[in-house]
Image (spheres, grey):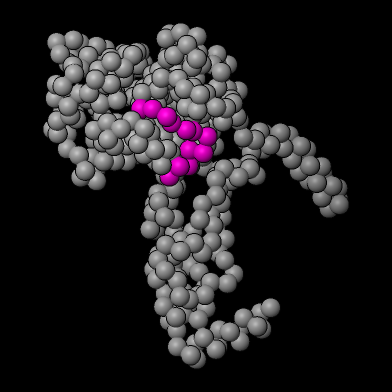
Amino acid sequence: MMQFFRLRFSLLSGLLLLLTAPSLLAANQVFTPAAPSIAASSYLLMDFNSGRVLVEKDADKHSAPASLTKIMTVYVVFRELKAGHLSLDEKVTISQKAWETSGSKMFVEVNKQVTIQDLLQGVIIQSGNDASVALAEHVAGSEETFADMMNEQAARLGMTNSHFENSMGLPTANHFSTARDLATLAQALIKEFPDYYRWDSQKEFTYNNITQQNRNQLLWRDPSVDGVKTGFTDEAGYCMVASAKREDMRLISVVLGTASPNARANESQSLLNFGFRFFETHRLYEANTPLAEARVRKGVTSKLPVSVAEDLYVTAPRKHFTELKAETQIDKAVFAPINKGDTVGSLTVSLGGETILSKPLVAMDSVAEGGIFRRLYDAALSLLEK
């Protein structure tokens, strides 16, 4: 009789396992929705805080950036302002070259003096080519030298597929960028200069009794959109870098080579809506908060707290964030002397067996070299562990 009940219990348990297995598998399966179809020659959608790319197509293809070039122009000027080399109320004398530059204009006049702030708003809101050249000449002496400054910043930011030859984006043979590089640039602009970035959401600007509207149509359509820039030339098509923030999540979209002003706005909106609908971003770890301990050899202390250098944000499909797995790996041999900020390991975050990101773990303190006996002891210990 006892064997009968055991057999019956075993059969029921097996049946229950079979019935629940599909739901268990479904619960563990990561749902990744299909990205929208985007009518652009190249595009990219990136989370601002985590840097994770959610959608991309031909994101490293060289493209004419048109007036998206001006994002780098104002970035360079912002850096000069932050360094104290310029001031917003400083006046710029408009040259003949700036005045006669073709394309979109702020309508500055030759030999007139215009403040840096007005010129920046003329670039950001009105997309003035004349204002871009005036700023470039004032900052660097010539537009050619200013282009060198632009390329220097591009290299520093890791924009490995970009090269700039002018400040305003009129096409030349060796003037190009990519969707990925432009997203990187927009991320740096917003992160480093939040106070100046407010001009990107300004819908219109009046100079010389001429009022012009911002060409970013999404500023009127979507209250979460607060930047960044549009561009157009026959070679580039209609382009846009857009950024939007909803609650604590900010996204950056780039579309290059669309067919019309409406198309670039519509395709940018589609990317942004997709990202906000299907993904979520949260801060996983705060910078300078101990995450693990490293075993230090030959130092005045044998233990060293380690952390991430910056706040660590992770972007994951909605409803799957609690399934993230974070693993720390500390270097086996960490020898003093160690400087604060030195890399001593790595942190890997995965979801469903797929690595989402990997970041270095850094020393939270400096550790000086220990005395002779400590060094000898650790050296002997290292030999024994081999």
Above-or-below relation of 4 to 264: below
Is-magenta flag for residue 160? yes
Residue at far bottom of view: 373
**Apparent side of residue 44 relative to residue 219 in the rendered image (left or right):** right
Residue 156, position as x, y percentages in the image: 43, 45
**Apparent side of residue 187 relative to residue 105 in the rendered image (left or right):** right
The residue shown at (39%, 58%) is 289
Residue 359, position as x, y percentages in the image: 51, 52
The residue shown at (51%, 86%) is 375
Q: Give the range drawn in magenta.
A: 155-167
Is-magenta flag for residue 157? yes
**Apparent side of residue 299 relative to residue 99 in the rendered image (left or right):** right
Q: If the image is split into quadrants, where does the C terminus sit?
A: bottom right
Above-or-below relation of 41 to 190: above
The residue shown at (76%, 43%) is 13
- Quarter of the view holding residue 37: top right
Residue 149, position as x, y percentages in the image: 36, 39
Residue at far front of view: 96
For this rendering, which residue is in front, 379 or 11? 379
Q: Is residue 121 something one can see in this rendering?
A: no
Above-or-below relation of 379 to 206: below
For this rendering, which residue is in front, 278 or 145? 145
Q: Is residue 163 something one can see in this rendering?
A: yes
The residue shown at (25%, 17%) is 99
